[in-house]
Image (cartoon, helix red, strand yellow):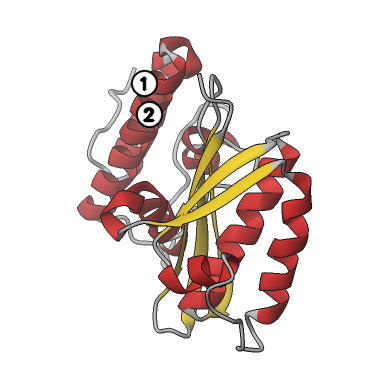
């Protein structure tokens, strides 16, 4: 078995510059896949891509990874990191320098350009972050989806407010995210990774909050 971890990264900007996010999908041999994605404010695509690289390198180093193969659909960043292109934009130079410094933590490092369809998962969670569904470092996403219900001991949804509207599309999207995240955890870590009961409780909460289901009164 290879002892090299693989990491797919992506950066997104809606407007370029506009609301931006980064995403990291880290796979270590014999370990659960770790995902991280969050917003970074207003930025360009290139800044978002470099932020993904920096955050990903920090995450890998924290988890003790020594050999790392990175894959990105940003051809510009890959060529710059491999020394084929120079970094000239002032917004990118500090991130480039930080990434280079972080490489000292690794015994072996490669970065390779891939097509967008080969970077699908990182692209998905980066867009999730822009849509208000981030993956925080050290926090399983299945749990974070249910976070808005966790403050209530009986798991009843909060009363609706004038500023929040739950649509059928939102309910479907939230339910799909829960199922996809659970399925991924089960496929990589086995059924014990996420209790079926916990997934059902989260789905029930989402459906009930969207008035799709209503519990029978006792």
Give the residue drawn at x 66%, y 89%. 90
Instruction: Residue at 39% x, 62% y: name it.
Output: 73
| Residue 203 left/right relative to 48 | left
Disc 2 packing (10 Å; few <14; some 14–19; many ≥20): some
Image coords of residue 16 (percent x, y): 43, 84
Q: Secondary structure at mark 1?
A: helix
Give me the C-alpha separation between circle 1 and circle 2. 5 Å
Q: Secondary structure at mark 2?
A: helix
- Describe residue 218's horizontal placement relative to residue 104 as left or right: left
Quarter residue 208 falls in = top left
Disc assigned to residue 78: none
Vertical position of residue 209 compared to residue 10: above or below = above
Within-10-Å neighbours for mark 1: few <14, some 14–19, many 20+: few
How many marks on residues?
Answer: 2
Query: What residue does disc 1 label?
Result: 187
Front residue of 209/126: it is 126
The one nearer the camera, 39 or 206, is: 39
Query: Which residue is tagged 2?
Result: 184
In the rendering, at what x and y percent does residue 174 appear? 34, 44
Question: Whole-percent x and y of residue 92?
Answer: 63, 80
- Relative horizontal placement of residue 83, taking residue 19 as reference (left or right): right
Tell me if label 1 and label 2 are in contact, CB under 8 Å.
yes
Up-down: is 91 above or below 165? below
Which residue occupies 74% across, 40% down? 62
Image coordinates for residue 108, horizontal then vertical, percent: 65, 43
């Amino acid at each position: 078995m290879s002892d090299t971890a693989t990491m797919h990264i992506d950066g997104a900007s809606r407007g370029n510059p506009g609301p931006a996010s980064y995403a990291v999908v880290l796979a270590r041999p014999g370990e659960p896949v770790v995902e991280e994605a969050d917003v970074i404010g207003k930025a360009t695509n290139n800044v978002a891509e470099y932020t993904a690289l920096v955050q990903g390198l920090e995450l890998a180093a924290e988890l003790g990874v020594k050999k790392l193969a990175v894959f990105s659909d940003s051809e510009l960043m890959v060529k710059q990191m491999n020394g084929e292109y120079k970094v000239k934009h002032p917004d990118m130079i500090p991130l480039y320098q930080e990434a280079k410094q972080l490489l000292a933590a690794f015994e072996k490092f490669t970065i390779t350009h891939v097509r967008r369809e080969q970077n699908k998962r990182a692209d998905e969670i980066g867009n999730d972050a822009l849509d208000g569904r981030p993956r925080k470092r050290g926090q399983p996403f299945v749990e974070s989806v249910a976070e808005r219900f966790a403050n209530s001991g009986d798991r009843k949804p909060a009363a609706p407010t004038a500023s929040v509207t739950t649509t059928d599309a939102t309910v479907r999207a939230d339910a799909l995210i829960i199922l996809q995240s659970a399925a991924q955890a089960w496929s990589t870590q086995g059924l014990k990774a996420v209790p079926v009961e916990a997934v059902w409780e989260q789905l029930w909460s989402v459906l009930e909050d969207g008035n799709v289901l209503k519990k029978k009164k006792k």
